[in-house]
Each structure stands twice: as C-alpha cells, then as structure tokens.
C-alpha cells in the first residue's frame, strides 16, 4: 500500500502539560478534524479530573473519541489501543474528516505507527501479571537483580532506586524473551501518521505542572478518587499519579501540602520520562511549545496542510 492510499492522520504528542489538548482542538477546528485519545489513563471512565481530560466545552465543540471507554478496574494494552484507535481513525476518515491523534503515551502511538523500536517490545497481559505478582512478593533489590540477570544493559539504564522503571524494564525484557521468534509489532498498515512532538523548556513545564495540579485539586481530584475507590476498590488505575496521593489525603495519611508536593513531584518525573521517549521518535516534527498559542498555530497549519495533501 502506497502512502497515497493510506489514511493520513495528524498525531500531536509530548509530555504532560505541554499543551497537547489545546493544540489538538485548534488544529481540529482549523482542518475540520476529530480527536482521538492516545493517553493510557484518559481511557478510564470516572477519572476525568485526575487524568486531565479536555474541557467539557472542548469536547462539545469537536468530536472526541476513546475517552472513558473502559472502567478503571479493567486492563488495557497497546495492542487493544491499535485496534480501537485504528477503528476510530477509519470511521473519521470515512466521514470526510481529518483524524487527529493526541496524547502522551508514546508506547501506544508508536505501536499504531508501526515504529516501535526493537528495544521497546510490547508486553502482554500475562507478562504484566507476572511482574505484578513478583513485585508484591519481593523487595526492589531482588527485582533489580532479576533484571540484571535477563537484561544487564536495561538494569544499568534504570539505576538502583526507581522501582517504577525497574518494573517496566522487567516487562520489556520478559516480553522480548517471549517474542524473540516473533518480533512483529501491532500496527495499522493502512494509516499514515504525521507526528508532531511538543517540546517545552524545563522551567516552563514545571510551572505548568504546578498550575495543573492546583487546578485538579480545585476541580475535585480527592472526591473523584474517593468515588472511584468506592465503586472499583481494587482498580489498578487508583495507583496512578494523583489518585494514590489523593486517597492518602482522604484517609488522613497525608496533609494537603504533602498531597500537592507529591503529585507535582510524580507528575514532573513522568513528564521527564515522556520527554525522553518522544525525543527518540523517528521522523517527528518538533514544535517549541513554550508559547501555547504559537504551538497551536503551528499545529493548525500542519493539520490544514495534511488535509490539503491527503
């Protein structure tokens, strides 16, 4: 299939608080587009505040897809995202609209694009379940020793103190072993993504993250977390950034200043990991997004051009 025969879609990605939703909305309005979510947390229902959904006004003004499509106690995968996003993109294209993918989950975007680097294999649910089970039984140093045994280079990159990165690296290493004879990654061959990466300076992203966390707390993050736990008490999504801290505050374990500081810290760490990932995306166009209005204009221009040439 030639590029001319494939469905052209714009993809706007970058770290949290980079202005992705704003840029996607302006681009969709400029090029008669519809937006498809590519954020692994925004797929959960009932978690609008804590995962930073677009505003209700934005979602009314332009059709948005794949937000809140599963309950918080359900697992989701990159392979399932490829199927769901692919179906949404094809449906949008059939209506004569421009599909605009937006989100910060690089794994999902690269899986859809068929550009998953060989050192980032996609783990399946069985692999994740095994790592979760082992993480409940063993301290971090044991898990790190396990990673050293099966992937020494990954263990060196992870370092010695980051449990989250150790678990993700274990998933990747085990998935690589499992799929050694089948390196094919899920992709949608009939879709061609034009990828834009929003880049924000360190000081600016820190400022935005603090403002974002303040806004989430004011919008009812704690109440949302409590409500999700009441309905889905064992939901894995409750361990995510913001929700774990909100529940600690609700349970009297943390103070309000501790809640704010910890959410800012975890969000900043996550944004740093996202930025590192997106710097490695092959063929992406990088846009300076320190000024959101300028970035939105650039995204709109890219959307109009893609619409014209598709």
Image (cartoon, helix red, strand yellow):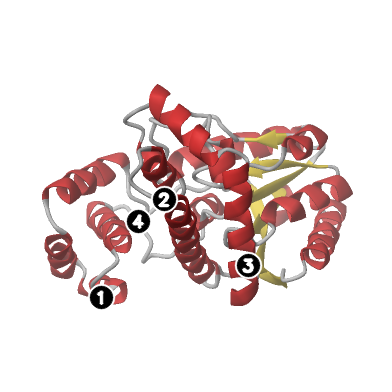
Between 145 and 239, the residue placed more toward the observer is 239
Whichever of labels 1 and 3 marks the residue nearer the N terminus, that label is 1
- Which mark's residue is nearer the viewer, 2 or 3? 2
Q: Is residue 61 placed above or below 227 in the rendered structure?
A: below
Q: Is residue 173 left or right of residue 32?
A: left
Whichever of labels 2 and 4 marks the residue nearer the N terminus, that label is 4
Q: Is residue 43 left or right of residue 56?
A: left
Q: Which residue is mark 3?
A: 207
Q: Place residue 124 in its image quadrant.
A: top left
Q: Place residue 302 in its image quadrant.
A: bottom right
Q: Is residue 284 left or right of residue 25?
A: left
- Residue 99 horizontal/vertical position (percent): 72, 44
- Residue 193 horizontal/vertical position (percent): 65, 55
Between 183 and 305, the residue placed more toward the observer is 305
Residue 103 can be seen in this image: no
Q: Which residue is mark 2?
A: 255
Q: Which residue is mark 4?
A: 183
- Separation of disc 2 and disc 4 at Cα? 48 Å
Q: Place residue 266 in its image quadrant.
A: bottom left
Looking at the image, which residue is at 55% across and 72% down?
A: 279
């Amino acid at each position: 299939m030639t590029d001319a025969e494939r469905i052209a879609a714009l993809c706007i990605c970058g770290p949290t608080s980079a202005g992705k939703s704003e840029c996607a909305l302006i681009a969709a309005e400029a090029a008669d587009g519809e937006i498809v979510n590519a954020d692994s947390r925004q797929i959960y229902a009932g978690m609008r505040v804590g995962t930073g959904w677009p505003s209700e006004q934005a979602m009314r003004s332009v059709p948005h897809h794949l937000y809140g499509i599963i309950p918080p106690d359900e697992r989701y995968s990159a392979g399932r995202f490829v199927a769901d996003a692919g179906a949404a993109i094809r449906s949008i294209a059939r209506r004569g609209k421009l599909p605009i993918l937006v989100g910060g989950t690089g794994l999902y975007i690269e899986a859809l694009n068929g550009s998953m680097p060989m050192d980032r294999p996609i783990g399946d649910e069985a692999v994740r379940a095994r790592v979760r089970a082992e993480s409940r039984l063993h301290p971090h140093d044991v898990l790190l020793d396990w990673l050293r045994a099966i992937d020494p280079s990954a263990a060196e990159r992870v370092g010695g103190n980051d449990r989250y990165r150790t678990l993700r690296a274990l998933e990747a290493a085990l998935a690589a072993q499992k799929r050694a004879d089948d390196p094919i990654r899920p992709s949608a061959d009939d879709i061609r993504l034009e990828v834009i990466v929003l880049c924000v300076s360190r000081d600016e992203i820190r400022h935005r993250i603090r403002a974002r966390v303040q806004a989430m707390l004011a919008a009812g993050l704690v109440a949302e977390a409590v409500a999700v736990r009441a309905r889905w008490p064992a939901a894995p999504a409750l361990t995510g950034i913001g929700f774990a801290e909100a529940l600690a505050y609700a349970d009297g374990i943390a103070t309000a200043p501790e809640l704010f500081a910890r959410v800012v810290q975890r969000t900043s760490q996550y944004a740093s990991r996202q930025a590192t990932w997106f710097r490695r995306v092959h063929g992406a166009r990088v846009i300076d997004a320190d000024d959101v209005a300028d970035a939105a204009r650039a995204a709109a221009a890219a959307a109009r051009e893609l619409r014209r040439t598709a």
